[in-house]
Image (spheres, rainbow, N blue to C red):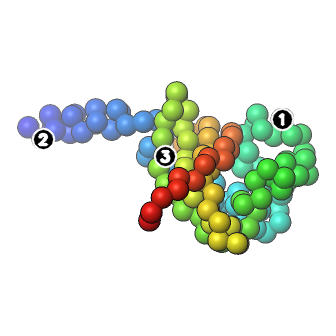
Amino acid sequence: MFRFASFVFSLVLLALPAGAEDRDRITGVIGAQIEAFRDDDITRAFGFASPRIRSLFGTPERFGQMVERGYPMVLRPNQVRYLELREVAGNLWQRVLITDQDGRLHLLDYQVVGGGGDWKINAVQILKVPQGNA
């Protein structure tokens, strides 16, 4: 009976979305990039971007300019909260709630690629924060 239960448990683990067991590593990469931004270390922050993103921007300076213009809330957030990790159309997306220095909420989706110990950030989308009663 024990062997059968172990086999069933193994099948359940295989059925989990790809990367579910890597949630801590994924949030760690996002957090490390945000820490690099806080430290004004754009070169280190650029290193957490996927090869596609690094190729698209070419230099840490151009990447940093894009972040300053489009995603200023990640440069020095007051609070970062990791929500759900989802698989959408074969891609992994980590939802992140950021409170900026002015107390405004920002909801972002980070697409990550890679796996194991080498996750990289491949895209970030700004989502509309739902309104309603808390």
The answer to whether residue 121 is seen in the rendering is: no
* Residue at 86% across, 40% down: 57
x, y percentage for residue 48?
Answer: 72, 49
Q: Amino acid at mark 2?
A: Phe
Q: Circle 2: is it few (<14), some (14-19), or many (20+) Cα within 10 Å?
A: few
The reply to whether callout 3 and callout 2 are in contact (CB within 8 Å) is no
x, y percentage for residue 5?
Answer: 16, 38
x, y percentage for residue 107?
Answer: 60, 53
Which residue is disc 1 drawn over?
55
Closer to the chain start, of discs 2 and 1, is 2
Which residue is disc 3 drawn over?
85
Q: Is residue 41 left or right of residue 127?
A: right
Which residue is disc 2 drawn over?
2
Disc 3 to disc 1, C-alpha distance: 26 Å
Dot in front, 3 or 2: 3
* Residue at 76% across, 62% down: 75
The reply to whether callout 2 and callout 1 are in contact (CB within 8 Å) is no
Q: Is residue 115 left or right of residue 32?
A: left
* Residue at 66% across, 43% down: 125
Q: Which mark is residue 24?
A: none
Residue lying furthest front: 132
Dot in front, 3 or 1: 3
Q: Amino acid at mark 3?
A: Leu
- Local secondary structure at mark 2: helix
- Local secondary structure at mark 1: helix
Dot in front, 2 or 1: 1
Most foreground residue, 67 or 61: 67
Closer to the chain start, of discs 3 and 1, is 1
